[in-house]
Every structure is written in structure tokens, then in C-alpha cells.
Image (cartoon, rainbow, N blue to C red):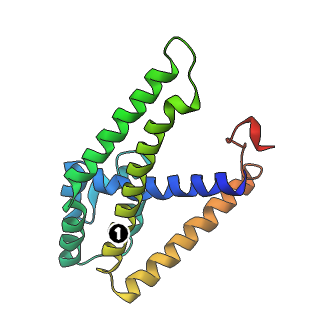
Amino acid sequence: MTRSKFGVAAAAALGLLFAQPLLAGPSAAQGMGHGFGHGAMMGMHGGGSPFLMLLKSANLTPAQQQQVQLILNSDRSRMQGIHQQLFALHEQISAKLFSAGTVTSADLKPLVQQASRLEADLNQNMADTAIAIRNVLTPDQVKHLAEVQQKLHTLHTQIQGLMGGSGPDMGGPDDN
């Protein structure tokens, strides 16, 4: 994977890491009061967030849990609106790509630019949310989360090694 494609993949991964807690349904919100419960535990299966799963290991106090929940709820409707706009743009792009006739990059450029602006807004909001949640934590909790994250990274590296390397290159034919 080239460096620029790696940057895009890393940004997408960051977005996925933080977006889902902002968009999690009521089950995740209800789970917050009980050590994050089932809503966060579904993160590996698409129903929650790996970030909230990691945060679960911080052993938040009930007061911290309430603060985190307030942060997550603070702009949920705005974030859902942005996601709906992105979905609509992706639908428009698909419609153009699969329509009859010739399609050029210029045909898609305004839609792609609009999507890029919305994605930038999402990424900034996710970073702001992560910082706000981090500010709720004690220094010992931050240290503990760093240790857990490093252990998870080490496990991931070990899994990759057991599976024969970093896995197939998913970037496409132009990555040679």
C-alpha cells in the first residue's frame, strides 16, 4: 500500500473507531450505566465501537460514565444528519456510475468534494469527542488504556504473523 493510500486507510479506520459511539443506538446508551453493557460489546460485530470497548477497561466511575454519555449524546442528531447526507451523496455517485452513457471524473467531482467536506467534519468531530472523553479520565486510567491498546496492538501483530504476514493487499491492481 502506498503512503498516501495508507494515510487514507488510517483516516478511515480512525473514523470507524470513533464514529460508532456517536451513532450507537439506545442499547449502547443504556449500557453506559452498567459498565457499557451489550451495546459496546457488539463493537466487533458492527453494533458498537472498539473505542468504547477499550474504554470499558478503564473502570469508569458512575460519574465518569454519566459524563461520557453526555459527551456521546451531545451532538448525536447532527452526526446522524451528516451521515444521512453522506449516504445520499454516495447514492448519487452510484446512480451516476451505473447510469447509461459515459461518466467522467468531472461528472463526479462536485459530489466527491461535497462528501470530502462532510467526512472532514465527521473526522474533526470524532477527534473532538475522543479528546473530550479523554479529559474525563484520570491520568492512571489514560495510562491503563495505553497499556491495553498496546497489548491489543501486539496481539494483532501476532495474529498477522500467524496468518502469514500482513494479509492480502486489498488496495487494488495499481498498488504494485
* Relative image position of residue 14 (x, y in whole percent): 48, 59
* Relative image position of residue 8 (x, y in whole percent): 58, 53
Classify mark 1: helix, strand or loop: helix
* Relative image position of residue 46 (x, y in whole percent): 40, 44
Give the crowd class for mark 1: few <14, some 14-19, many >=20 residues within 10 Å: some
Q: Residue at x 34, y 62 (%)?
A: 125
Q: Is residue 67 left or right of residue 136?
A: left
- Quadrant assignment, res 74: bottom left
Please, is residue 93 above or below residue 71 in the view?
above
Q: Residue at x 41, y 59 (%)?
A: 123
Q: State the residue in front, 153 or 83.
A: 83
Most extreme residue toward the bottom is 139
Q: Residue at x 50, y 73 (%)?
A: 148
Q: Residue at x 76, y 43 (%)?
A: 175
Q: State the residue in front, 116 or 136.
A: 116
* Number of marks drawn: 1
Most extreme residue toward the front is 106
Instruction: Classify the position of the C terminus by image quarter.
Output: top right
Which amino acid type corresponds to the residue marked 1 in the rendered image?
Asp
Q: Which residue is mark 1?
A: 128
Please, is residue 136 above or below residue 1 in the view?
below
Q: Is residue 96 left or right of residue 2?
A: left
* Relative image position of residue 45 (x, y in whole percent): 42, 44
Please, is residue 26 above or below residue 131 in the view?
above
**In this view of the protein, can residue 36 be seen by the observer?**
yes
Most extreme residue toward the right is 176
**In this view of the protein, can residue 24 be seen by the observer?**
no
